[in-house]
Image: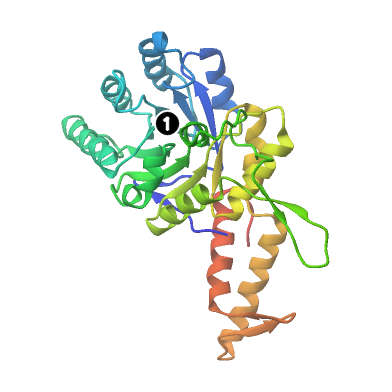
Amino acid sequence: MVAIAEGVSGFRLQRSELAVPATSEKFFEKAARGPTDSLFLDLEDAVAPNRRIEARAAAVKALGEVDWGSKTASVRVNGLTTPWAISDILAVAACPRLDMILLPKVETAGDVIFLDRLLTGLELETPRARPLGIEILIETTKGLANVEAIAASSPRLEGIIFGVGDYSIELENFDTVFGASNGDYAVLARAEGKPPEHHWNDQWHFALARIANACRAYGLRPIDGPFTNYGDPDGYRASATRARALGFEGKWAIHPSQVEIANEVFTPSAGQIAWARDIAAKMDAAAGEGKGAIGLEGVLIDRAHVLLSDKILRRARVAGLEVH
């Protein structure tokens, strides 16, 4: 289990982040009432270029009129190299209900610093109850090459999302289902006296692990990106579970059917909670006897496990589970 990230606006539960095209107003109320922890209104890839100004106005209207409840609400603006970016930022940053700006195709720390300074100027002119947070997409090879510097770039930065689609396009690996595994990524394993066997690997392990490590080093939330085959719930679950094992604490949902899976995967299980409670109780008793470590079913348990149990129980509490 991994650390809980804190953002400029306090802790944000972000097991699931639902993508909602800003031009699809019929989905707004459903998204607001649904089980997703967070969502973003999309002004970028899900919107045709000739409708992006229209999408911006629709997002501003939705932020002002739709009751989003306690959900974290973001807007994915267009990238800084496009003609829409600055107007997008200026328009949505004026919305009191907005929690974060989602900036795509971040490649350098300077991209985040620019957005931070622009938001700081806007907030000096029109103060907000809470400063806006920033979440970003790492979806280019240059962005991944600079991810540690990017993660350290701004106190507003709360989370980094792996944008597997554009990243795979830059790599030119020709995947057509973004986020899914590739059967070609395998080696023929040979061992003496045994027939050769194919050993399949995860072609996204390097990118995911590097993003997760950068996030944890600088107190950010690592969020896995899309799995575009929404008709394959087992594939989505496997993708989310893999990301969880690498330290991610949430995943994008590009279809409402994926939200419940993400919420389940990124919530501590009953078994994990029971283990954490048991370890906390046993280590409290051991401390009372002056012991810093104990043996439990052949496993050495020490103070590191106390920290781990604390993180599991905290994650469970913020997910709304009863933990005593």
Helix, strand or loop at label 1? It is strand
In this view of the protein, which residue sits in the foreground, 48 or 30?
A: 48
Tell me, yes or no, if residue 9 can be seen here.
no
Residue in the image at 39% along x and 20% along y: 64
Q: Nearer the viewer, residue 76 or 169?
A: 169
Where is residue 46 shown, x and y percent of the image?
A: 49, 20
Expressed as whole percent of the image width and height from the top left, the position of residue 193 reads 83, 67
- Which residue extends farthest bottom? 290
Q: Is residue 29 above or below residue 316?
A: above
* Residue type at the position of mark 1: Ser
Residue 241 in sight: yes
Question: Which residue is located at x 38 percent, y 47 percent?
Answer: 145
- Residue extending furthest toward the front: 192
Q: Position of residue 43 (x, y in %)?
A: 41, 20
Residue 311: percent from the left, percent from the top? 54, 62
Residue at the image point whose x is 64% and y is 73% from the top: 279
Say which quadrant the C terminus sits in: bottom right
Q: Is residue 158 left or right of residue 205?
A: left
Residue closest to the eye, 223 or 266 = 223
The colour scheme used here is rainbow
Mark 1 closeness class: few <14, some 14–19, many ≥20 residues within 10 Å:
many
In the drawing, does residue 57 fall left or right of residue 162?
left
| Residue where numbered disc 1 is placed | 74
Res. 16 image quadrant: top right
Give the quarter of the figure containing the N terminus.
bottom right
